[in-house]
């Protein structure tokens, strides 16, 4: 084999290797993108949980994902409390049940007077998210943080459900002792709670209205 032919052969092999590497990188990127889309599309609100507590290493990862959400001017205007104290959860639930007497509530809260009712769906973990009352963008910041929680949890097959009634319970003046127990400062108010635990159900997706989206060109 002449030197010229040898150089040409080496060049062809190098180009082929580079093409294969680029294809592998592209395939890997597409696969990763599909995993993200799959996680989003498979996520459901879970209202029935296994009693087992979420593993600490999984919870740590979820919280890291949460606080890496974007926020206006990177002020990270949220306060987050992870509640795994069963006694505290039971006391907050009892407070909600008492205040719900005689009221017409919607969704699962309508069953508040039934035996064994839990506004937190008997989840072993509740994440309380509070917004900065002085920051007009804080509600959006908290929403972005929440979505990171929901999706990172789903990626580990951990169930979640956003509970808006957490705000109505804990922002009530009578619940100040709960806020003090959770060390939530006066500068913040509860925006919502997120129940979390291992899934004990697999609900179907509810219909979405694509007509609410318009593309203006």
Image (spheres, rainbow, N blue to C red):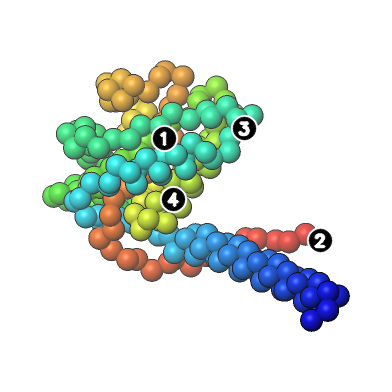
Q: Is residue 167 visible?
A: no
**Residue at numbered disc 4:** 152
**Residue at numbered disc 1:** 129
Q: Quadrant of the C terminus?
A: bottom right
Residue drawn at point x = 34 percent, y = 54 percent:
158
Mark 4: which secondary structure?
A: helix
Q: Is residue 132 left or right of residue 166?
A: right
Taking the view exactly as shown, the residue that stands out farthest to the bottom is 1
- Report how far apart the C-alphas of labels 4 and 1 lie in the structure: 16 Å
Classify 158 as above or below 62: below
Residue drawn at point x = 44 percent, y = 39 percent:
64
Quarter assignment of residue 100: top left
Label 1 Cα crowd, 10 Å radius (few <14 / some 14-19 / many 20+): many
Q: Position of residue 59 (x, y in %)?
A: 34, 43
- Report how far apart the C-alphas of labels 2 and 1 lie in the structure: 37 Å
Q: Is residue 121 visible?
A: yes
- Report how far apart the C-alphas of labels 4 and 2 lie in the structure: 34 Å
**Residue at numbered disc 2:** 217
Sequence-wise first label, 2 or 1: 1
Classify 172 as above or below 112: above
Q: Is residue 62 left or right of residue 210?
A: left
Mark 2: which secondary structure?
A: loop
Sequence-wise first label, 3 or 1: 3
| Closer to viewer: mark 4 or mark 1 | 4
- Report how far apart the C-alphas of labels 3 and 1 lie in the structure: 16 Å
Sequence-wise first label, 4 or 1: 1
Q: Position of residue 71 (x, y in %)?
A: 58, 35
Q: Quadrant of the N terminus?
A: bottom right
The front one of 174 and 60 is: 60
The disc at residue 72 is 3
**Pointers 4 and 1 in contact (CB under 8 A)?**
no
């Amino acid at each position: 084999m002449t030197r010229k032919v040898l150089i040409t052969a080496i060049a062809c092999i190098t180009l082929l290797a580079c093409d294969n590497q680029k294809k592998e990188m592209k395939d890997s990127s597409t696969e990763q993108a599909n995993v993200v889309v799959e996680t989003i599309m498979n996520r459901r609100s879970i209202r029935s949980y296994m009693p087992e507590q979420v593993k600490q290493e999984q919870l740590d990862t979820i919280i890291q994902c949460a606080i890496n959400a974007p926020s206006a001017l990177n002020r990270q205007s949220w306060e987050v409390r992870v509640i795994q104290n069963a006694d505290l959860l039971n006391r907050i639930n009892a407070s909600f049940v008492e205040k719900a007497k005689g009221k017409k509530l919607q969704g699962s809260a309508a069953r508040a007077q039934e035996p064994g009712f839990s506004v937190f769906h008997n989840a072993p973990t509740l994440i309380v998210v509070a917004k900065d009352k002085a920051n007009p963008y804080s509600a959006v910041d908290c929403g972005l943080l929440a979505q990171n929680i929901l999706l990172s949890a789903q990626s580990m097959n951990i169930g979640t459900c956003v509970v808006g009634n957490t705000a109505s319970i804990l922002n009530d003046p009578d619940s100040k002792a709960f806020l003090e127990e959770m060390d939530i400062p006066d500068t913040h108010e509860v925006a919502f709670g997120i129940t979390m635990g291992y899934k004990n159900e697999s609900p179907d997706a509810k219909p979405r209205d694509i007509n609410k989206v318009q593309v203006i060109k």
